[in-house]
Image (cartoon, rainbow, N blue to C red):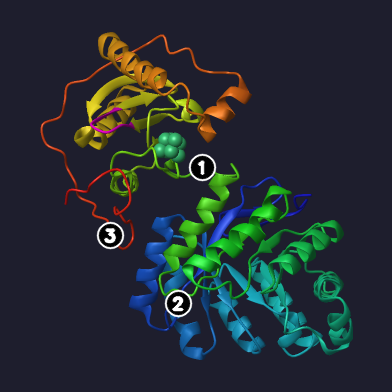
C-alpha cells in the first residue's frame, strides 16, 4: 500500500519506492539564524533527511533565504493562515511548503500558492489535523473522527487536482494513536500521493516516543507512510530524529549505525550489566556501520538467541565471553569485557572480517559449555525459545583471550537509575 507517486524535496525522494524519509522541525525562533542553523546542523548530523522551520512572520521569511542557502538538508517552510508568507517562502527558495488548505484563506489563496509553487518547481505538504477540520465536517467528526479526517484530506487532494497541482504529499494527524492508524490506513487506500506520518503533540520524550513507535510502527509495518516526523516535547530536535531512526531500524526499513541488543536481566545476573550496556551504548554512538551488538547477562543460555548478532558478550561473575556471529572468540576477565569487545569490533571493521584465534576460541567455547552444562536444568525463557527453535548452534570453535590490564569505565550509572540493591553484584565506581 506504499504510495505510488513520488515527489522530490530538493534531492530527497518521498514516496514511490524511496526509503522512508526522516524529518523533524526546529524549535528555535527561525529568525534567530545562529540558533536555527545550529539546530539544523545537529538534526542533520543525527540523520534527518529534511528539516521544517516555522515561518509565522516576515522576519522568518528573511531568515529563510539564508537558511535555505546554508542548510545541509532540504528545508520545508511551515506556513499557517497567511498565504502571502507562503508565496514569499517560495520566493525565498524554500524546498517545500507545508500548509493546511483549510486555514489559508480559501481556494483562491491556495490557487495562488499552487501557481507560484508550480513555477518554482516546489512541492507542498498539505495537511489536516484533528481539531482544525472544516466546519462542514464537524458533525461527521463527532460521529466518526476517522472518516472526518480522511474526508478532509481527500477534499484537499481534490482541490489540488482541480488546481492541476499534483506535486504534494499529504498528512492527517491526530493526538489519538488508534485514530491516526485507522485514518492513515483509510487514506492510503484512497489516494496515491505520498503520506507524511506523525502523531500530533505526542508528548514527552518517554511517552511521545512510545506513542509514536506504536502508531507509526503499525502503519509503517503495513507499508503505509513515506516520511515520518516524531513530535516530542523537547527543545532538542535531534532527539526526535533518533527516535525516528530507531523505529525505522526496528522495522528493518532503513539502516543507520549500530543496533544494540541487551537482555532484560533477571535474578541470574552476577555482574553490573547496566553499566556495561551504558558504556557500550555510548561507545557505539561513534560508529556509523550497521553492526548488531548483543549483551547477554549470563552464559546460562549459551549464545542462544543472540547468535545472529555481529558481535556480543555474555557475562558471568568474574569473566565473560566475546562472540561473533554465534561463535565464541575469546574469554575475558569481566572488567575488561567492553574494551575487548571493541577491540574485536575495530579489528574486524579494519580487516573486513572477523579474526578468529583458534586456541582462544576453543577455550571460550569450553568455558561456555561448562557453564551451560552446570546450568543444564535451568529453563530460562531464552532456553525454552532455543529448544522450540531446535536450531542450537554447534559450538565447535572455542576460545580465550589475554586479560586486559585496566578496565576503562567512562560511563557511570547511579543507584537511582539502576539499583544494585537486591541484586547479585556490586558496582565499582
Ligand atoms: S537468563 Fe536471560 S535475562 Fe537472565 S541474565 Fe541470563 S541472559 Fe539475561
Q: Name the residue rendered at 37%, 33% in the picture.
A: 298
Is 212 situated above or below 53?
above
Q: Secondary structure at mark 3?
A: loop
Q: Name the residue rendered at 50%, 17% in the picture.
A: 393
* Magenta-colored stretch includes residue 318: yes
Residue 179 in the image: state x and y as whole percent. Answer: 75, 69
Question: Disc 2, ligand 1: is the CB inside 8 Å?
Answer: no
Q: How dense is the environment of label 3, judged by Cα within 10 Å: few (below 14), some, or many (20 and up)?
A: few
Instruction: From the viewer's side, name the closer residue of 5 and 278.
Output: 278
Residue 255: give its label: 1
Task: List the residue tagged with mark 2.
Answer: 27
Q: Name the residue rendered at 58%, 77% in the picture.
A: 78
Q: How many callouts does the rendering have? A: 3
Does residue 119 appear in the picture of this structure? yes
Residue 415: give its label: 3
Q: Is residue 427 left or right of residue 309?
A: left
Q: For residue 23, which quarter of the picture?
A: bottom right
Residue 353 in the image: state x and y as whole percent. Answer: 37, 20
Distance from label 2 to label 1 (Cα)? 26 Å
Q: Is residue 287 left or right of residue 201?
A: left
Q: Secondary structure at mark 1?
A: loop
Residue 373 in the image: state x and y as whole percent. Answer: 41, 17
Looking at marks 1 and 3 on the same chain, the residue that comes earlier in the sequence is marked by: 1
The magenta span reads: 315-320
Q: Is residue 229 left or right of residue 279?
A: right
Q: Secondary structure at mark 2?
A: loop
Question: Disc 1, ligand 1: is the CB inside 8 Å?
Answer: no
Asked if marks 3 and 2 touch (Cβ < 8 Å), the reply is: no
Q: How dense is the environment of label 1, judged by Cα within 10 Å: few (below 14), some, or many (20 and up)?
A: some
Amino acid at each position: 500500500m506504499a504510495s505510488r507517486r513520488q515527489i522530490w524535496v530538493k534531492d530527497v525522494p518521498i514516496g514511490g519506492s524511496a526509503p522512508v524519509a526522516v524529518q523533524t522541525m526546529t524549535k528555535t525562533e527561525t529568525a534567530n539564524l545562529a540558533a536555527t542553523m545550529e539546530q539544523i546542523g545537529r538534526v542533520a548530523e543525527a540523520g534527518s533527511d529534511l528539516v521544517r522551520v516555522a515561518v509565522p512572520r516576515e522576519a522568518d521569511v528573511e531568515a529563510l533565504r539564508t537558511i535555505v542557502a546554508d542548510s545541509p538538508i532540504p528545508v520545508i517552510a511551515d506556513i499557517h493562515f497567511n498565504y502571502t508568507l507562503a508565496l514569499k517562502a517560495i520566493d525565498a527558495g524554500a524546498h517545500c511548503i507545508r500548509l493546511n488548505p483549510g486555514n489559508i484563506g480559501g481556494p483562491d489563496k491556495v490557487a495562488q500558492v499552487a501557481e507560484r509553487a508550480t513555477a518554482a518547481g516546489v512541492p507542498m505538504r498539505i495537511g489536516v489535523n484533528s481539531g482544525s477540520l472544516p466546519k462542514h465536517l464537524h458533525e461527521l467528526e463527532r460521529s466518526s473522527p476517522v472518516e472526518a479526517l480522511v474526508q478532509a484530506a481527500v477534499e484537499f487532494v481534490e482541490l489540488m487536482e482541480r488546481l492541476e497541482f499534483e506535486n504534494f504529499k499529504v498528512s492527517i494527524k491526530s493526538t489519538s494513536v488508534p485514530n491516526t492508524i485507522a485514518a492513515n490506513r483509510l487514506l492510503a487506500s484512497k489516494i496515491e500521493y505520498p503520506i507524511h506520518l506523525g502523531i500530533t503533540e505526542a508528548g514527552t520524550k518517554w511517552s511521545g516516543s512510545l506513542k509514536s513507535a506504536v502508531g507509526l510502527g503499525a502503519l509503517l509495518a503495513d507499508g503505509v507512510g513515506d516520511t515520518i516526523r516524531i513530535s516530542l516535547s523537547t527543545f532538542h530536535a535531534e532527539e526526535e530524529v533518533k527516535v525516528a531512526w530507531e523505529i525505522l531500524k526496528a522495522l528493518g526499513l532503513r539502516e543507520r549505525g549500530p543496533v544494540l541488543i541487551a537482555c532484560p536481566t533477571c535474578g541470574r545476573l552476577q555482574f553490573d550489566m547496566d553499566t556495561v550496556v551504558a558504556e557500550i551504548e555510548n561507545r557505539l554512538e561513534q560508529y556509523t556501520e550497521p553492526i548488531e551488538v548483543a549483551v547477554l547477562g549470563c552464559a546460562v543460555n549459551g549464545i542462544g538467541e543472540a547468535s545472529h548478532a555481529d558481535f556480543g558478550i555474555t557475562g558471568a561473575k568474574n569473566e565473560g565471553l566475546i562472540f561473533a556471529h554465534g561463535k565464541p572468540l575469546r574469554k575475558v576477565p569481566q572488567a575488561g569485557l567492553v574494551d575487548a569487545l571493541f577491540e574485536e569490533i575495530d579489528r574486524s571493521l579494519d580487516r573486513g572480517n572477523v579474526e578468529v584465534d583458534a586456541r582462544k576460541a576453543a577455550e571460550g567455547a569450553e568455558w561456555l559449555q561448562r557453564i551451560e552444562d552446570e546450568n543444564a536444568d535451568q529453563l530460562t525463557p531464552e532456553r525454552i525459545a532455543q529448544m522450540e527453535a531446535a536450531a542450537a548452534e554447534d559450538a565447535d570453535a572455542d576460545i580465550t583471550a589475554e586479560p586486559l590490564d585496566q578496565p576503562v569505565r567512562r560511563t557511570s550509572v547511579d543507584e537511582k537509575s539502576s539499583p544494585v540493591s537486591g541484586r547479585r553484584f556490586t558496582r565499582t565506581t
